[in-house]
Structure formats: structure tokens, C-alpha cells
Amino acid sequence: MVVAGGLTALGGAAGCSGDDTGEAGASPTSSSGAAAASSDSSGSGGLDSSTGELPPPTRWIVTADFLAGTLTLVDYDALAAGERDPAVLVRGTIDLSAYAGPGAMEVEIAPDGHTALVSITPAFFDTIVGQTLGFTDLELDGVGLVVDLDTGEVVTELATAHVPLGFAFTPDGTRAFSCNFGHAAAPGSTLSVIDMATFEVLEDNEVGGGPEQIAIDASGTLGIFNVDALDGVRVFEVADPS
């Protein structure tokens, strides 16, 4: 059974390269290797008459597959056009099972459509919520990852103060924010600011126990996130999250 911890769709184009070595990488259903970006959204539904292969998607849907420890790349345009065949829709997977933690819980794609932030974490499944659902022996560990969707490779691990859960990007993609929920053995209470040019954590701000999900408005001025310990939300200025 595969439990999808989260999913996200992007508006830009991205490709993925084949990797059948068993290492972390994208494994598209076609055998063409690297898939180039395409601007023709009408080309996602059928085979290329010259190559006999599926053309690259112009837009992805990416799911975080918790128990499988993977990301799955789905052809957005084909799905929107009514395609239901998994062999056509699922264009690749990225294996993240080598990283500490029970599995990929959430994924957020950068505005450029090529980079994703992924949380490997038990999140709230190590509480009574998970116990009720049968998760009784989860690994209490985790990490935030930067993943290149074009190559299917992990670029780096994020050095956040606690294990992250939810992410959000500024509209220009220069910075990202992570809600660091932590886990039962190391509860989190911080909001991190990440420089997307260097992937360095610029600051960790104390915000209260169990920050979970975060969003930033379209202007990049205000952000909002919920905090479990407060039973509510906090609003902050993106320019000064402290």
C-alpha cells in the first residue's frame, strides 16, 4: 500500500532523467533518458510519431508517497485531458528511501518548476492519530531535502533547527520557509528561512510548539502558518518573519 503524504502541481515545465541503477533518481516510463521541457501542452496525450515515445510533459503533478519513500511524477496535461491509464500518467519516480525517517510526507515545488522541497518525517503519525491508523512503529527521525526534478537527484539536506513538515516559497522563488514540526523524540517549534540560491538556512525563529502548514500571499508580503500548541494561526511579514 502506498500512502501519499502530499501532492503539489506546478505551472512550469520540468523533465526527469532515467536512472535504473537503484540509486535515487527519476525513472520515466519511456526509455529516452533525459526529457526536455516542452511548451506544447497538447502533446502530452499520445505517442510521438517520429520516435514512438511519449513526449515530455509541460507540467507535473508530484506526490509525496509516505510509505513507499518516493516522489511520483504525474503528467498534469494528460490527466486534465482525461487520460486515466497509469502507464501514460505516471512518468517517473524518485527514490528517497535511503534518507532517515519513515517516508516522504510533503512536497512543495519552487516557482521555476525545477526544484522541490521535500519533508521526510513521521509528522503527526507518531501521535495518537497515527496509532489509530495503525502506525505503531515509525522511525522517529527525518530531514528536509532539496530535490532537482530534472535529474531526479537530491541536491542537499536542509540544516533546519528541527525536522520540517510544510514549506512555502516566495513568489520570486528566492526564499523558502519551513514549518519545523519535529517528531515525538525531538518536538519542533521553529520557522526557518531558506536561501534558495545557496540552500542555506538564514534563520530559525521560535514560533511555538508544532508549526505545521504555511502559505505566502501572491504579493510575497504576508505569510500565515498554523501552530499546534496554540490551536491557531500566526501571520507574519515575509520581510521580517521574526
Image (cartoon, grey):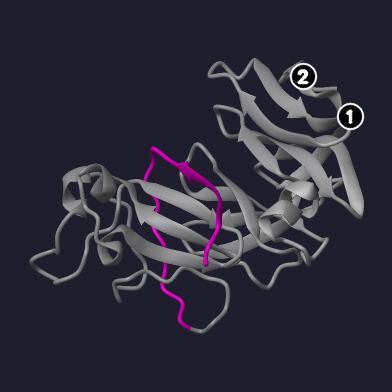
> Which residue reaches farthest bottom?
21
| Residue at 48 percent of width and 64 percent of height | 151
State the SS at label 1: loop
**Mark 1 highlights which residue?**
208
Range covered by the magenta-colored residues:
1-20
Q: CA gap, disc 1 to disc 2? A: 10 Å
Residue 4 among magenta residues:
yes
Q: Are marks 1 and 2 in contact (CB under 8 Å)?
A: yes
Horizontal relation, residue 86 to residue 143: left or right:
left
**Count of numbered badges drawn on the protein:** 2
Horizontal side, residue 96 vs residue 122: left or right: left
Residue annotated with mark 2: 234
Q: Amino acid at mark 2?
A: Arg
Q: Nearer the viewer, residue 174 or 58?
A: 58
The answer to which image quadrant residue 169 occupies is top right
Name the residue nearer the viewer: 71 or 124.
124
Question: Where is residue 100 shown, x and y percent of the image?
Answer: 76, 67
> Which residue ends up furthest to the front in the rendered image?
132
Identify residue type, mark 1.
Gly
Point out residue 51 in the picture as x, y percentages from the top left corner. Answer: 14, 71
Residue placed at 41% from the left, 73% from the top? 18
Q: Quadrant of the C terminus?
A: top right
The answer to whether residue 48 is above or below residue 168 is: below
- Report the disc number at residue 60: none
